[in-house]
Amino acid sequence: MSTLLRTAAVARLPRDLHPVAWWVWAIGLAAYASFTTNPLLLLLLVGVVSVVVAARRGDQAWARSFRLYVGLALFIVATRVLFRVLLGAVPGHVLIDLPEIPLPDWVLGIRLLGPLTREALLAGLYDGMRLGAIVICVGAANALANPKRLLRSLPPALYEVGTAVVVAVTVLPQLAESVQRVRAAQRLRSGATGKVRRLRRFLVPVLEDALERSMALAAGMDTRGYGRTAGIPVLTRRITSALMLVSLVGLCVGVYAVLDGTTPGWLAATMLVLGAGAAAGGLRLAGRRVTRTVYRPDRWRWPEVAVALSGVAVGAAGWWIARDQVPIAYPGVSAVPAVTLTALAGGLIGLVPVVAAPVPASNVLEEATA
């Protein structure tokens, strides 16, 4: 009993949580957002994500990019509403009677401007909020998960693809860090006060810093032997290709069987298991051609399991609500959206990381040096 308590206490020591656990949690919340257009539930998800990010993000560069994703989400909502104003043709209560711009006869079903109704505005707002909530969930994963440790946690077969994905998703956090560093440097020195010259003094250092980071990344990847592969027998390569083909067919058929209500359940389960097993075997064989080692691999402890399961539970709750509580998940634009206790509880499960996840090590070091 004392050993279990000691292990549980060690898992709660200040450290960075496994990045895969953060991504599973964020994907679960994004799945919940994709299953509903209820603005109350979407605002609840955004609030849950914001609380978790504020409580458990570190002091690294990528942790400061969350506000950029929030800004992007607001831009998406505004753009969606604007398109509804320009192209909306939803009948209802007219708010503003805008003049309609005539279009050619070959443009059928599209109306430019015209009467602006309350239902059109609400429909655009609901759709934009759903997409914005998904973007904020992805931004939370980028702010909480260490991208370098995420790359180290990928299977060897996905190392090269994972490197490209990690580089792509870290562009925005690195750009945010460059912007903050350039702004801090410009506050310490005087210069041009005109808008054009001040913008040039701001953009050139940011672009130069991004280029220097790209060159440093390329040099580091070349030094570490990126892209170097090991020779494997021809038979192994053929078996790997066959397994990947079987997995692709099995997963496609299994997913189609799950979505099609007329397909027997045993067929869907069999094809999904066959596809997943073939994919696991193919990835394991394909990983033999990648020669790399992992120094001190990240371990999964009970906080990682709790955070990941909370994300899975939130996603499952959103799926259940979309299936059994359709008026709650997809409210109409002519009435006030309603919520149920189950829908609220499903979203609030996402707050588990505030209690279960340990404090990031960078925060403790910053407090110690302050």
Image: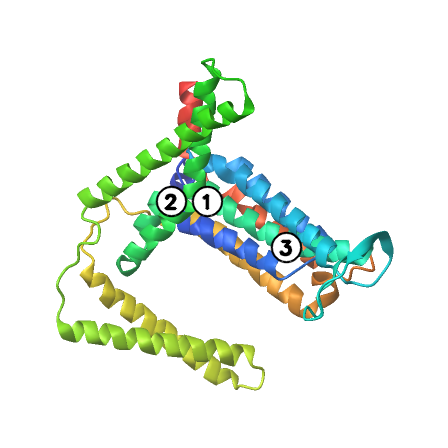
Residue 317 placement, left or right of 294: right
Q: CA distance from mark 3 to mark 2?
A: 26 Å
Q: Which mark is residue 7?
A: none
Three-letter amino acid code at the position of disc 2: Pro
Towards the viewer: 202 or 188: 202
Q: CA distance from mark 3 to mark 1?
A: 19 Å
Q: Nearer the viewer, mark 3 or mark 2?
A: 3
Towards the viewer: 48 or 253: 253
Q: Residues within 10 Å of mark 2 (few under 14, many from 20)?
A: many
Task: First in sequence, mark 3 or 2: give its number.
Answer: 3
Task: First in sequence, mark 3 or 1: give its number.
Answer: 3
Three-letter amino acid code at the position of disc 3: Arg
Return the x and y of residue 172 as percentages of the image width and height: 45, 41
- Please give the residue where the numbered disc 1 appears in the rendered image: 142
- Please give the residue where the numbered disc 3 appears in the rendered image: 130
- The residue sitting at the front extreme is 104
Q: Residues within 10 Å of mark 3 (few under 14, many from 20)?
A: many
At 37% across and 52% down in the image, what residue appears?
Answer: 165
Q: Are marks 2 and 1 in contact (CB under 8 Å)?
A: yes
Q: Residues within 10 Å of mark 1 (few under 14, many from 20)?
A: many
Residue 327 in view: yes
Q: Is residue 22 above or below residue 257?
A: above
At 27% across and 77% down in the image, what residue appears?
Answer: 242
Q: CA distance from mark 2 to mark 1?
A: 8 Å
